Image (tube, rainbow, N blue to C red):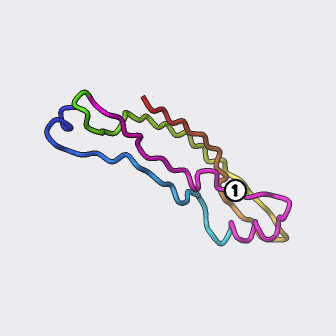
Amino acid sequence: MLLKREGYHFDFTYNIKHVSFGNKRDFDFIKNRFKDLDMEHPCDGIEDKPVFVKNNEGKEVPNLIKTMFYLVAVPSYFEKGLSKYHVYQLISNYEVTHD
């Protein structure tokens, strides 16, 4: 709060475009060869922006926001013939609280 009173402005807007662990070539191969497996990137497209509320002086200010991310990278191995492919599949969850 002290920095805010000194005139600093904080923008807590975020947009996660893509998160993955592993080689893109391996992901592409797995997606093409293992059609029954739905390779998703669960964090892709997560976004949020602050909600504005009026303070005691009637000015619009960003409401308090708390965002918690939980991310687990699970190693996964795929074999096709003599080739082995190694990627990490992500398990994720997030929670956003506007106070």
Residue found 30% across the figure and 38% down from its top: 61
In the shown orientation, is residue 89 left or right of residue 2? right
User: Residue 52, located in which quarter of the rendered image?
Assistant: top left
Identify residue type, mark 1: Glu
Q: Position of residue 13 (x, y in %)?
A: 40, 49
In the shown orientation, is residue 62 left or right of residue 83? left
Decide which of 63, 40 is in the foreground and name it: 63
Q: Position of residue 24 (x, y in %)?
A: 62, 69
In the shown orientation, is residue 86 left or right of residue 22? right
Q: Which residue is mark 1?
A: 40
User: Residue 30, located in which quarter of the rendered image?
Assistant: bottom right
Count the marks: how many? Answer: 1
In the shown orientation, is residue 74 left or right of residue 53? right
When the figure is inspected, residue 66 is found, relative to residue 48, above or below; the finding is above
When the figure is inspected, residue 48 is found, relative to residue 53, above or below; the finding is below
Residues in magenta? 27-55
Residue 47, magenta (yes or no): yes
Residue found 64% across the figure and 51% down from its top: 42
Q: Secondary structure at mark 1?
A: loop
When the figure is inspected, residue 76 is found, relative to residue 93, above or below; the finding is below
Residue found 66% across the figure and 47% down from its top: 74
Decide which of 20, 2 is in the foreground and name it: 2
Q: Position of residue 23 (x, y in %)?
A: 61, 67
Residue found 50% across the figure and 36% down from its top: 96
